[in-house]
Image (tube, rainbow, N blue to C red):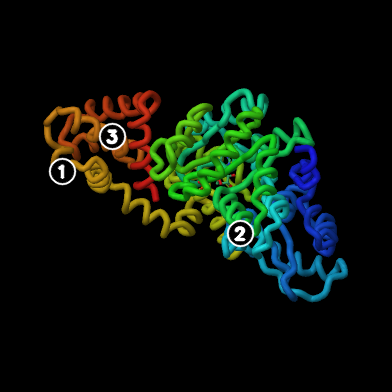
């Protein structure tokens, strides 16, 4: 194992305190960043410029942002400045193009070509410097996952192994996974922390098989100290990939190395994933992240606004949080729209400004979260006739969906208990009891929690 160490990305390359640009062969970009250092504040530089990876494509400088959010902000606010800094630092006149990581991968190969250079593929996947425990806002919806991640960061390979974080899109699974990676590297700079999205892992595996470099592929992954694999639902139905992953998993577990996985649902519910993998996933700890509640959404908005250098009042944050409930990525998207709108129109962000700027989005939500629509969505979800939600029948088969529908109406609409009671042809105390009951069951009954979150997601998009 020692023999292949040199081919691993040195841990320091993952260090958030070092510029990712250290990895870029093109020194022109390093000089350009240096130039920008004198123009931008540290916070702007670390948030928007340092996470970019640069490569030359003919007479273009292609900057790959870790996600769409960064891509859009860089396009709007920094492109021209980067071009000027590039020229000023001795570069020739080139076009600057900004893409997001997933798009830039395009053909599914992380490197953009078909070179079976496993090391390069791995080094191209770095931890996002912004995804740390410090920038993760904790609330009821994610506190368990955060605590588990923190525990793993403190006792890797011992506390919970594997740690599997599951939940809907944009709820911070990747963020927490990277946060553990950063913490492990801070504890031990030489630790070999490997982060890879499942799709890339599979592409690298296929490429290794094609180019006869399977041994190298295996050795590289099996000698990691911590392996972080994102979105493992992607492995469903890919039997050869599952087989390879099964052996990697066993090898790492035998060596007491830490494994962290994320998945878009409770892993036992994944179709076409081998039972032996499902059972291994349950050896450690499986925790969920759920959509954040109102207070957490407000806290996230205020913290992100500060991070983006955007002045946002509590009142506006509260207004946005009341209307945008689905996930954190969407909250970030809203901040981006507000920021772009503010720049274009030169106005301060007031509640009225937010209402105008986001009117299409708000109208969409309002259409979806009527009591009638909640009822029909719940009836369809549980496959029961709509009229039964209103009927006086008390069978458990009907009572639970009815309570879920009432709780959703209470959470998603501004209607009072008596209004909701009237819509369900029940007394307001029944609605009150239903809301409390469902809140309690969401803590203790996994099935109810999943049903509620699924419905919340359907109604919130
Ligand atoms: N609790 C939180 N505090 C601060 N930022 C958060 C939080 N949760 C999510 N985010 C931010 O929301 C964005 C989306 O998060 P992330 O990519 O981790 O979601 P995910 O659950 O992995 O989604 P997907 O399943 O779609 O990959 C990121 O920018 C992340 O930093």
- Residue nearest the viewer, comparing 282 with 249: 249
**Depicted 308 relative to depicted 435: above or below:** below
Q: Which residue is mark 1?
A: 385
| Ligand 1 located in image quadrant | top right
Horizontal relation, residue 342 to residue 295: left or right = right
Residue that appears at 47% across and 50% down:
238
Can the viewer see residue 190 in this picture? Answer: yes
Q: Residues within 10 Å of mark 1 (few under 14, many from 20)?
A: few
How many marks can you see?
3
Give the percent coordinates (x, y) of residue 30.
82, 59
Can the viewer see residue 77 in this picture? Answer: no
- Mark 1 and mark 3 lie on one chain; the one further toward the N terminus is 1
Q: Which residue is mark 2?
A: 210
| Label 2 SS | helix
- Mark 2 and mark 1 lie on one chain; the one further toward the N terminus is 2
Question: CA separation, marks 1 and 3?
Answer: 15 Å
Give the percent coordinates (x, y) of residue 228.
61, 40
Residue that appears at 60% across and 52% down:
205
Quadrant of the rendered image containing residue 219? top right
| Label 1 SS | loop
Give the percent coordinates (x, y) of residue 151.
62, 25
Q: Which residue is mark 3?
A: 404
- Mark 3 and mark 2 lie on one chain; the one further toward the N terminus is 2
Horizontal relation, residue 332 to residue 124: left or right = left
| Label 3 SS | helix
- Residue nearest the viewer, comparing 420 with 346: 420
Question: CA separation, marks 3 and 2?
Answer: 51 Å
Quadrant location of the N terminus in the rendered image: top right
Q: Residues within 10 Å of mark 2 (few under 14, many from 20)?
A: few
- Residue nearest the viewer, comparing 210 with 351: 210
Quadrant of the rendered image containing residue 418? top left
Residue at mark 2: C-beta within 8 A of ligand 1: no
């Amino acid at each position: 194992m020692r023999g292949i160490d040199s081919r691993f990305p040195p841990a320091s390359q993952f260090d958030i305190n070092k510029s990712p640009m250290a990895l870029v062969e093109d020194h022109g970009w390093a000089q350009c960043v240096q130039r920008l250092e004198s123009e931008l504040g540290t916070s702007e530089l670390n948030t928007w410029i340092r996470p970019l990876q640069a490569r030359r494509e003919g007479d273009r400088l292609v900057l790959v942002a870790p996600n769409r959010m960064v891509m859009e902000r860089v396009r709007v606010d920094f492109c021209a400045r980067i071009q000027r800094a590039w020229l000023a630092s001795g570069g020739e006149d080139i076009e600057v193009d900004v893409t997001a990581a997933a798009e830039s991968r395009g053909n599914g190969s992380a490197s953009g070509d078909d070179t079976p250079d496993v090391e390069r593929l791995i080094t191209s996947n770095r931890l996002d410097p912004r995804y740390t425990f410090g920038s993760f806002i904790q609330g009821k919806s994610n506190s368990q996952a955060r605590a588990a991640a923190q525990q793993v960061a403190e006792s890797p390979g011992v506390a919970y192994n594997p740690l599997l974080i599951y939940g809907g899109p944009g709820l911070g699974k990747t963020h927490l996974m990277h946060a553990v990676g950063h913490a492990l590297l801070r504890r031990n700079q030489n630790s070999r922390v490997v982060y890879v999205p499942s799709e890339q892992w599979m592409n690298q595996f296929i490429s290794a098989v094609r180019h006869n470099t399977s041994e190298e592929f295996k050795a590289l992954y099996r000698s990691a100290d911590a392996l972080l694999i994102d979105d493992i639902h992607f492995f469903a139905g890919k039997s050869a990939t599952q087989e390879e992953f099964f052996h990697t998993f066993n090898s790492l577990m035998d060596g007491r190395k830490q494994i962290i996985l994320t998945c878009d649902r409770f892993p036992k519910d994944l179709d076409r994933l081998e039972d032996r993998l499902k059972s291994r996933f349950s050896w450690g700890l499986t925790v969920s992240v759920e959509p954040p509640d109102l207070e957490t959404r407000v806290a996230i908005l205020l913290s992100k606004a500060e991070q983006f250098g955007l002045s946002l009042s509590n009142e506006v944050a509260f207004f946005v949080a009341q209307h945008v409930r689905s996930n954190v990525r969407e909250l970030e998207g809203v901040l981006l729209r507000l920021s772009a709108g503010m720049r274009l129109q030169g106005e301060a962000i007031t509640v009225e400004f937010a209402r105008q700027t986001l009117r299409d989005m708000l109208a969409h939500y309002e259409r979806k979260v009527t009591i009638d629509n909640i009822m029909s969505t719940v009836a369809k979800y549980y496959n029961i006739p709509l009229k039964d939600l209103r009927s006086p029948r008390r069978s458990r088969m009907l009572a639970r969906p009815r309570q879920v529908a009432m709780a959703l109406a209470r959470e998603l609409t501004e209607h009072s208990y008596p209004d909701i009671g009237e819509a369900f042809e029940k007394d307001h105390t029944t609605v009150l009891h239903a809301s409390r009951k469902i809140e309690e069951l969401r803590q203790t009954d996994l099935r109810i929690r999943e049903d509620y979150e699924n419905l919340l997601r359907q109604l919130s998009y």
